[in-house]
Image (cartoon, grey):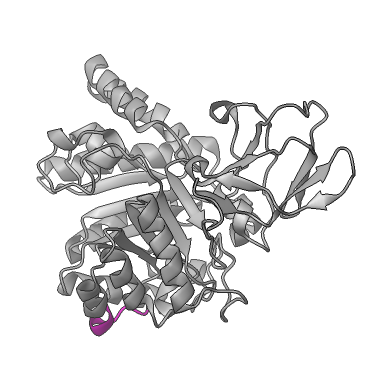
Amino acid sequence: MISVSKLLCGLDAESDGLRYDAAAESEKSQISSDRQQRPVVVWNATRRCNLSCQHCYAAAETEPASGELTTAEAKGLIRELADYGVPVLLFSGGEPTMREDLAELVKYAADRDIRPVLSTNGTLLTQDRARELQRAGLAYVGVSVDGRREVNDAFRGADGAFDAAVDGIEACLSVGLKTGLRYTITEQTAPDMDAVIELLADVGVDRFCFYHLAYGGRGADITDADLDPAAKRAAVRRLCELTLEYHSRGEEIETLLVGNYADAAYLVEFARERFSEAHARRVYRYLAQNGGDPAGERVADIDYPGMFISRSSGRGTVSVTCVTARSARSGRTTLTHCWSFSELGAVICPENARSVAIRGYAGARPDFAPSQQQVIWRHRILSVISPRRKCAGTCQTSSTPARSRHCGLI
């Protein structure tokens, strides 16, 4: 996430320490006083959803998927994450509020010093459900609204979704839950940005996260709805201008951009144009401290079947049975290879591997030296864990994580 309000307006936020190692500069209570050392984990707690959104990266369905974690298994996962020191667990989906044990799992995470937060379409959040989650220790709710009523309902495949989401937002705010907006920018939704911010700011929302379209799940079927580069720059510029306008009126809304780190360079140029070279350098320093796209390093995704740290090793490895390696000597394929939890998203090539397949995507390594162990692909964890999803792009190989390129899935 790139905080537009922090970089342009200097707005303090509870994530300043975690994101920019700037806790000492902030007057707000911090999630962490130190820059992030362990990943924020997004858990797609279920594949089930009551809506059918055009852009759903999880390709959610109306029924639970086979293999979803039970309450006991989910608690085991949360214990492992707590032992590793994960600072934040984001319950996502599908629609996580369709899990009847959600409040129980939220409390379980909170009791283990993990900050539990929720990503939801908001349509099932009554005041009673919001109060239950608030009492369980939920720290934040991000509700997805994509455009004004007609646009949102068409985008999300259900009449009444907009009104139900706004009702859910109001229910959360009424019980004291910090609540923000999640908004995906496409050709259909971009023109409604101003109106949706105005409406929800009047309701009491003060945090607005704007997401670029993710080319995963059903999002891969609507790539033609994505903005072209010029329109994306115009949308980002408009968000910058709206942020400045609200702050100039004394309304200190928090605004963030998510999903395209090319936005970082644009913000530096915007600060140089609108303010000064000194301001642009300050923006650049914060962005450099943040470290760029966090996928696979500071943000990890666990799909609905879950992910478990191997109990057979004290070194914090995770068994990934969907990674296969074909031996250069015997030609046999094995499913016994692991990647380090401390290198989330990095698949480690064993010495005798000639090729590796990751859930339907295979790549030969003609340049592979059998005597070496190399990181061959950095993937967002979602592409490694999911049993039904294929890589959406072409990955490059590299001997060092820093030089590898993400595959483009989510």
Q: Is residue 155 above or below residue 5?
A: below
Tell me if 112 is positioned left or right of 247 in this view.
Answer: right
Can residue 57 be spotted in the picture?
yes
Q: Position of residue 179 (x, y in %)?
A: 25, 63
| Residue 379 placement: quadrant | top right
Q: Is residue 184 magenta?
A: no
Q: Is residue 235 above or below residue 275?
A: below
Q: Residue at x 28, y 21 (%)?
A: 280
Can residue 273 be spotted in the picture?
no
Q: Residue at x 19, y 66 (%)?
A: 203
Q: What stretch of residues is rendered in magenta?
A: 124-129
The single residue placed furthest to the top in the displayed view is 277
The single residue placed furthest to the right in the displayed view is 330
Q: Residue at x 44, y 68 (%)?
A: 76
Give the camera-side residue of 318 and 86. 318
Q: Quadrant of the N terminus?
A: top left
Q: Is residue 271 above or below residue 308?
A: above
Q: Position of residue 25 (x, y in %)?
A: 14, 33
| Residue 82 placement: quadrant | bottom left
Q: Residue at x 21, y 62 (%)?
A: 178
Q: Position of residue 351 (x, y in %)?
A: 74, 35
Q: Is residue 128 magenta?
A: yes
Q: Position of residue 29 (x, y in %)?
A: 14, 48
Count of numbered circles in the view: 0
Give the camera-side residue of 244 and 408. 408
